[in-house]
Amino acid sequence: MSNSSSLTHFLLLAFADRWELQLLHFWLFLGISLAALLASGLILSAVACNHHLHTPMGFFLLNLSLTDLGCICTTVPKAMHNSLHNTTTISYMGCAAQVFFFNCFMSAEFSLLTIMCYDRYVAICKPLHYGTLLGSRACAHMAAAAWATGFLNALLHTANTFSLPLCQGNALGQFFCELPHILKLSCSHSGYCREIGLIGVGSCLAFGCFVFIVFSYVQIFRAVLRIPSEQGRHKAFSTCLPHLTVVSLFLSTGIFAYLKPPSISSPSLDLALSVLYSVVPPALNPLIYSLRYQELRDALRKMITGCFSEAKMFLFSAP
């Protein structure tokens, strides 16, 4: 295969050789995606319909749920289709779309997690300035910046990667189209270096966000420890626990997947790690916030109870 102009499709990595196991993966992914869609949908509905959640944290949580839905819908449906039909192909344009949307949603999610950390920092360390620093206009600007950052990052990476000549075949060692695996097919040294430069810049920005998150939580913990009552300390820390859990899950899975030692690398391990960082965090994030965020939990309980009451009234009033 001489260059990318002759490519019409890529070959993705299959989860198993036997069709029965492929079918098992289909049902597993179906269950995960339905659970994630249901949980994210409930959060979106609760935040939109409950005025008690019309807060900066509720607004950012709504945006985070959208990125989680986007991540799941970008990678999982194609994997389910391939498992069900016992195939491994994805079209060239479909692969480019996967790369763009996955990078867009993942970049936007990390930016939103950084902004949500700032929200917790202001709420605990500067509570008197919360309404000023996190007004509705400021929140809208920060959320727009997060989405714009994700869009620009994804656009640059996708445009550069798919402009490279690809002459090392069309087999990707991954269950979805991912930049590092596509770059392995490139035969352009200058283009490869250009993409590595873009990745380096993005990594520096991500590291800057990570440093900001660590610094913010150091200040938060110092402020919490100065609260005189144990109940006050517990209440302040409980507002940070969902965000801290989501950030830890997001960073730990991604760092281990990309920075693991080459000596322990294998196709099966790489496949498991790719599922771990691309599917598990977006699926668990809504559950983590639903279990740990008291106001959201109360809103969800009220909404579900109201739906059941209306359904019961409709059934009993039917002739």
Image (tube, helix red, strand yellow):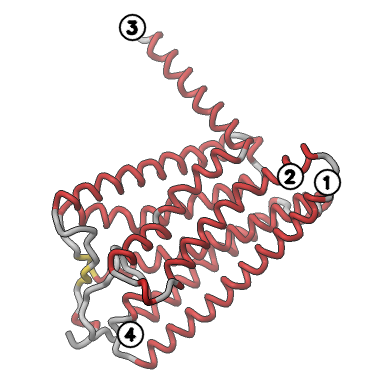
Which residue lies under the disc numbered 3?
319
Tell me the SS state at disc 1.
Answer: loop
CA distance for labels 2 and 4? 50 Å
- In the displayed structure, would residue 83 be above or below residue 53? below
Which residue lies under the disc numbered 4?
164
Of the two numbered discs 2 and 4 in the rendering, the one whose residue sits closer to the viewer: 2
Which residue is at a point 54% across and 66% down the rendered structure image? Answer: 148
CB-based contact (under 8 Å), mark 1 and mark 3: no
Which residue lies under the disc numbered 1?
227
Amino acid type assigned to the residue bearing label 3 in the image: Pro
* Whether residue 227 is visible: yes
Q: Residue 224 location in percent, x, y?
A: 78, 50
Of the two numbered discs 1 and 3 in the rendering, the one whose residue sits closer to the viewer: 1
Which residue is at a point 25% across and 50% down the rendered structure image? Answer: 25
Tell me the SS state at disc 2.
Answer: helix
CA distance for labels 3 and 4? 66 Å
- In the displayed structure, would residue 56 be above or below residue 292? below
Q: Residue 277 location in percent, x, y?
A: 43, 60
CA distance for labels 1 and 2? 9 Å
Tell me the SS state at disc 3.
Answer: loop
Q: Is residue 39 left or right of residue 98?
A: right
Q: Earlier in the sequence, mark 3 or mark 2?
A: 2
Amino acid type assigned to the residue bearing label 1 in the image: Ile
Q: Is residue 289 left or right of residue 233?
A: left
Q: Quadrant of residue 300?
A: top right
Which residue lies under the disc numbered 2?
236
Q: Residue furthest front?
A: 263
Q: Nearer the viewer, residue 113 or 140?
A: 113
- In the displayed structure, would residue 291 be above or below residue 149? above
Q: Earlier in the sequence, mark 2 or mark 4?
A: 4
Q: Earlier in the sequence, mark 3 or mark 4?
A: 4
Q: Quadrant of residue 158?
A: bottom left
